[in-house]
Image: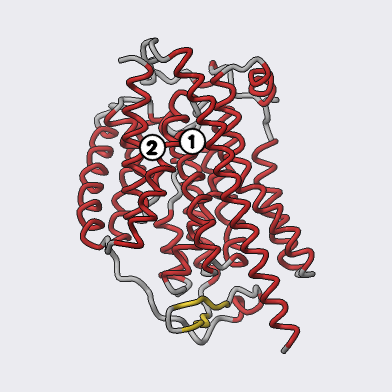
Amino acid sequence: MSILTFTLILILGAYLAGLVGSLTGLGGGVVVIPLLTLVFHVDIRYAIGAALLASIANSSGAASAYIKEGITNIRLGMFLEIATTVGAVIGALIAVYTPTNTIAILFGSVLLFSAAMTLRKKNQVALTEGSKLSAILKLNSSYPTPTGTVDYKLKNVGAGFSIMTVAGLMSGLLGIGSGALKVLAMDTAMKIPFKVSTTTSNFMIGVTAAASAVVYLQRGYMDPGIAFPVVLGVLGGAFTGAKLLTSINPSTLRIIFCIAITFVAFEMIYNGYQHKF
Amino acid sequence: MKNISTHLIQDRDVEKIVGKLLRFGVITASIVVLAGGILFLIQYGTAARPDYHIFKGEENSYITFKGIFMGIFTLKPMAIIQFGVLLLIITPIMRIVFSLFAFVIEKDKMYVIITLIVLAIILGSTFGGLKI
């Protein structure tokens, strides 16, 4: 296969990855790793480097749109980024000593968990009574809805912070945004309405990924020949996905994609178990 | 009451500028990556696909800032792509720097400190063990 053919097929694949990532809310990075390793037989380390870039592109591109709508809680994001960036740095350090097959199995497990999280019942209720710590840290805020501005308060700040550290660790180790874990921390532990938790999580993904990105760049994980088609393809796909989301109801699509992703996750775990990475 | 409302307006303005900054960073990075990519395909398009199933890691010649910047001046396609990659990585970091200024203007001491901590972690990771 020539470089030209490889690049064109990879752009198309990355475009689909960005589209699926955006429609399911999983992010493009998560879909890029199985695409590169299972379909193109690329070493998982190159795939991790490319996925990190895809996560940053996805997050920065989408976050700019969400902030405009005023849903993102910037203070909450900034506070929790202490946890995710520390986790990401530790993850990137551990990554060197982790066998690639273990990484593949871990990735498959996170993918399974993420797919399940996408189909969960979402928290729509805004708390009126928050914890003491949430008030001290000025994390309580409000967000616009079609029926007017809704105030919300939050609790279990410590638990949320701890889960965020794990989310950062996974992000640094696997090169993914681990949006599902971030949403778990905000949605399930801190009881934040899902619109706020999804957008704030997306906002944080870029910063978390940036914390380990240069480390990976200097370890040679980011190959220009792979980075170029992946970044452009994923961005294009995410852009189309965002446009589609405003005109179609993705709930059926989401279920189909999540089932597909479950199979991919098992394939990753199986191949990792068989030492194929 | 008046004080609170002007405070909120400032907050919204800052958020809008941050949003624009993120978009500008992503667009600039993708244009640079695209330009490098086109040059890359013109020069190497007909060559066979490298053995990506074998991880070469640090043999890669464009992993240092010096290597990337030297490569740009000699118009090496791979270096231009890596420069675009660097721009993409810098975008969220710039977002934090900007938020820092915003919290300083708002005189929100607690969040100035929180933002400085985040920035220190990222820069520490970036420049610790750096190969220039």
Quadrant of residue A176 in the image?
top left
Residue B104 image offset from top left, x and y in percent: 78, 63
What is the chain letter for disc 1? Answer: A
Q: Find the distance from the CA under tag 2 to the CA under tag 1.
A: 8 Å
Identity of the residue drawn at 74% across and 62% down: B112
Q: Is residue B31 left or right of residue A147?
A: right
Q: Which residue is mark 1?
A: A95
The answer to whether A241 is drawn above or below residue A72 in the figure is above
Q: Amino acid at mark 1?
A: Ala
Q: Is residue A196 left or right of residue A246?
A: right
The answer to whether A267 is drawn above or below residue A149 in the figure is above
Classed neighbour count for the residue bearing mark 2: other residues with Cα under 10 Å, few (<14), some (14–19), many (≥20): many
- The tag earlier along the polypeptide, 2 or 1, is 1
Res. A103 mark: 2
Identity of the residue drawn at 41% across and 63% down: A184
Name the residue at the bottom extreme: B1
